[in-house]
Amino acid sequence: MSTEHTGFCPVYRAIGVLQEKWVLHIVRSLLDGEKGFNELARAVGGCNSATLTQRLEHLEQLNIISKRTEDSHGKLARSVYSLTPAGRQLQSVIDAIDAWGRDHLQRPVPDAQSA
């Protein structure tokens, strides 16, 4: 099997998008419903604001998420993110990863020192 991709390969392209760090965490979090930036940052956990902003902008360009701005009556406007229909279709990908993880990965055993 050739590893060169001279033409369009949807699997290669999709893996390229989904393998970016934090992308699947963002999608998984938004499957529960729309979230503001800070709420999303807390849900994703561990992603710095600059990286999260970059990932959200890229996912918006790809039409995986949509962003709307809520007027906060004199305060800074609030950005709210949600999945587009294309983004919601990733539910089956998340479900497949969940099933695979449950079948093939064991829960970490708690450290005797931390127990």
Image: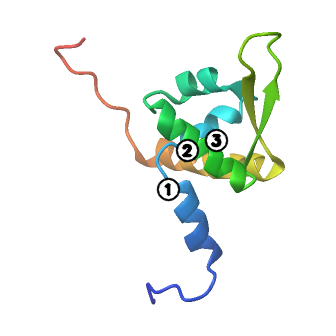
Q: Which residue is mark 3?
A: 27
Identify the secondary structure beneath mark 1: loop
Q: Is residue 17 above or below residue 46?
A: below
Sequence-wise first label, 3 or 1? 1
Identify the secondary structure beneath mark 3: helix
| Amino acid at pointer 1 | Gln
Foreground label between 3 and 2: 2
**Mark 1–mark 2 distance (CA, rounded to whole Å):** 15 Å
| Label placed on residue 89 | none
Sequence-wise first label, 1 or 2? 1
| Amino acid at pointer 2 | Gln
- Classify 10 Å Cα crowding around label 2: few (below 14), some (14-19), many (20 and above): few
Could you tell whether 109 is left or right of 101 in the image?
A: left
| Amino acid at pointer 3 | Val
Q: Which residue is mark 2?
A: 54
**Mark 3–mark 1 distance (CA, rounded to whole Å):** 12 Å
Foreground label between 1 and 2: 2
Q: Residue at x 69, y 34 (%)?
A: 30
Q: Is residue 74 above or below residue 29?
A: above
Q: Residue at x 76, y 46 (%)?
A: 88
Q: Residue at x 22, y 13 (%)?
A: 114
Where is residue 113 drawn, in percent x and y?
16, 14
Q: Which residue is mark 1?
A: 19
| Colouring scheme applied when the structure was drawn | rainbow
Instruction: Answer with the quarter of the image where residue 81 lies.
Output: top right
Q: Quadrant of the N terminus?
A: bottom left
Where is residue 108 drawn, in percent x and y?
32, 31
Where is residue 106 drawn, in percent x and y?
37, 38
Labels 3 & 1 near each other (Cβ < 8 A)? no
